[in-house]
Image: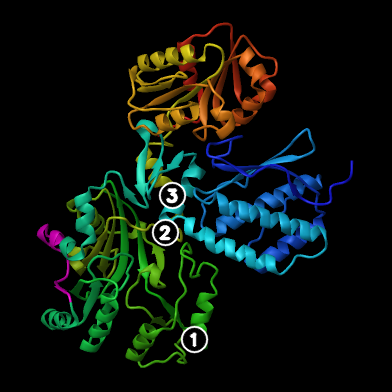
Amino acid sequence: MNRVSSWEITSPLSLMTGYAFGSRHMTMRVSMRITALNPQQLNRVCHWLRESVGISPDIQQRQNNAEQSLDVFLNILYQFQQAQGFPLCESGIHQALPSGEVRLFIPVHRGAFALLANLFQCVVQIFNEVLQGKISAQMAGELKNISTAMQRFAPATGNIRSFMAAAFAEGIPLQRLPGMAILYGQGTRGRLLDSSLTDRTPGIACQQARNKPVASEILRVYGLPVQAHKVADNIPAALAAAETIGYPVVVKPVDLDRGEGVAADLRTPQQVKEACQTALSLSKHLMIEKHFYGRDYRITVLDGRVIWCVERVPGGVMGDGVSTITQLTDQLNRDPERSDNSYSPLKILQLDDEALTLLAQEGMTTESVPSAGQFIRLRRISNITRGGVPVAVTDQIHPDNRRLAERAAAVLRLDFAGVDLLIPDIRKSWRESGAAICEVNAQPTIGNYTAAHLYGEILRHMLQGNGRIPLILVGGKNSGEYARDIGRALAAAGYSSGVYDGQDITINGEHAEALAADVFTAGRLLVMDPSVGAVVLALTDASVAERGLPFQRYDVLVTDSAFAAENQALLDMILPACDGRIQSLNGHEDFHGLAAGVVVSEASAFHAEDVVALLQDCPGLDVS
């Protein structure tokens, strides 16, 4: 046989919408013939990618050059997708085939299959070109075009991406639904989130919180500290409102979040006019509010309890007695945590008109040299999106201030809220120092800079653990009958069971108003059904072998020796996803090899109650 001198795709690129070989993502499946790259060639590919598109693939030391080449190849695809905002938790799987080919299973984000296929072919070409001695310049342009196109499919907010990443890290199953919502957990333990908006946030409460004047009036009715305000629809009305309230004032769009269009500490009619021009370009209605001098805190409240607090330090620079403000700003923006990327924890700070105005108020210019330790504020508001920096202060909150934030969320009927509090010092009671609630956000951004750990903690709180329900697969001649028997045993044990026996879907023994053409479809709808507390699937058709499992992990597999012997390829695919037990009926000599790391119980006969008892020893089922 002639030695292969290139990477050659030998099968169509196909999408597996289910989960295979223990992967927690849907995957692109493809077979290839490859030529191993030597370490020098792999280093060259990685250096080129670093210089061309800014990704740095990992090179793990391997004795086998072919396996090392495949590892790097998959890692390139993984890191490229991660860089576009796709929250993937694994790089993929490669398998050697008896033919000498390899089969790859590559994680793909929903909706991006065609673009991943383009990326895959592009990276194949890069590997082939490095084998020939040179990577063409046009490849960088192709990768950048793919990057731009992929970003359209990335999660719309950093919250979504971070919650998804936390779910993967915590072993929490998730399912993206049409629209923006994501189902975390399964069945009766599942919860919906749209960014940080939950399925238990009342629609009325959300509408009230998003309308700033309405929210402020509600807080005032309940005796909470808010500033005087007026609503205006044009600049003359805004100027009149500012005169009535008294300077300094704040201008806010009525219906926008994340500090968009907000300008604070406005001291003159001209400043108000300029702020209104900006705000009216974003919204038809403005809120003119009395400015409150204090430090800016975001207090996060979940289910009536403060879980986190940060001080939002406004965008600015700290003097060193030597550098100009321009130089200090350049130094600040070199922080790797700062970029204009929507997922970056900190944002670039620009010396724009707002910064120049604030400098002029202090008698300074961009070439002024602040003294050592002198903080120069370059933003009127402290939002992170405007260059601010969050500093965690949860352990410093005075109990009165904690209760104030919890009450603000409660009176607005919000289960999850970000309360923005202006107060001179969070360590002192608002009753003594004075304070103002400037906003209550019904869909708060949490952020990764100080609070990355919160995403997993919030999910586990909402789901009371990892959100998984018992999932049982049944294979063999009598799988439909066995599945029904297990469903009855689950009901006797107190579970609300959903069963697919190969023909019908039943929930708690009643025929469900749902249609399913195959095992995969039935399994997917049952695991998402909010009335189902455990699922039993009879493996009666080839849909799982073709599409993968309808869920990322499961707990028990019940099968007999004949099914195991006849379906080794299927078992190879689904056994890595088993977190619990295999109930082997009548034994099977190859089971222990197929199910490495999984406990195999052998039985001479089927007993449904014994299968249900196995759930007690399944480590994947977690109720905290």
Please rate how many residues cluster around mark 2, counting C-alpha atoms within 10 Å: few if below 14, some from 14 to 19, many from 20.
many
Q: Looking at the picture, which amino acid does disc 3 mark?
A: Phe
Residue 237 painted magenta = no
Q: Determine the secondary structure under disc 3.
A: helix
Classify residue 247 as left or right of residue 344.
Answer: left
Classify residue 465 as left or right of residue 587.
Answer: left
Task: Give the colour scheme shown.
Answer: rainbow
Q: Looking at the picture, which amino acid does disc 1 mark?
A: Thr
Residue 231 painted magenta = yes
Q: Position of residue 446 (x, y in %)?
A: 38, 57
The reply to whether callout 2 and callout 1 are in contact (CB within 8 Å) is no
Q: Which residue is mark 1?
A: 326
Please name the residue shown 80% across and 52% down the image.
Answer: 6
Q: How many marks?
A: 3
> In which image quadrant can residue 258 be found?
bottom left
Q: Which residue is mark 2?
A: 447
Q: Position of residue 269 (x, y in %)?
A: 20, 87
Disc marking residue 163 = 3
Along the line of sight, the residue nearer the viewer: 112 or 297: 112
The reply to whether callout 3 and callout 2 are in contact (CB within 8 Å) is no
Residue numbers of the magenta segment: 217-233
Closer to the eye: label 3 or 2? 3
Q: Decide: is 290 above or below 214.
A: below
Please name the residue shown 45% across and 55% down the image.
Answer: 155
Distance from label 1 to label 3 (Cα)? 37 Å
Q: Determine the secondary structure under disc 2.
A: loop
Q: Quadrant of the N terminus?
A: top right
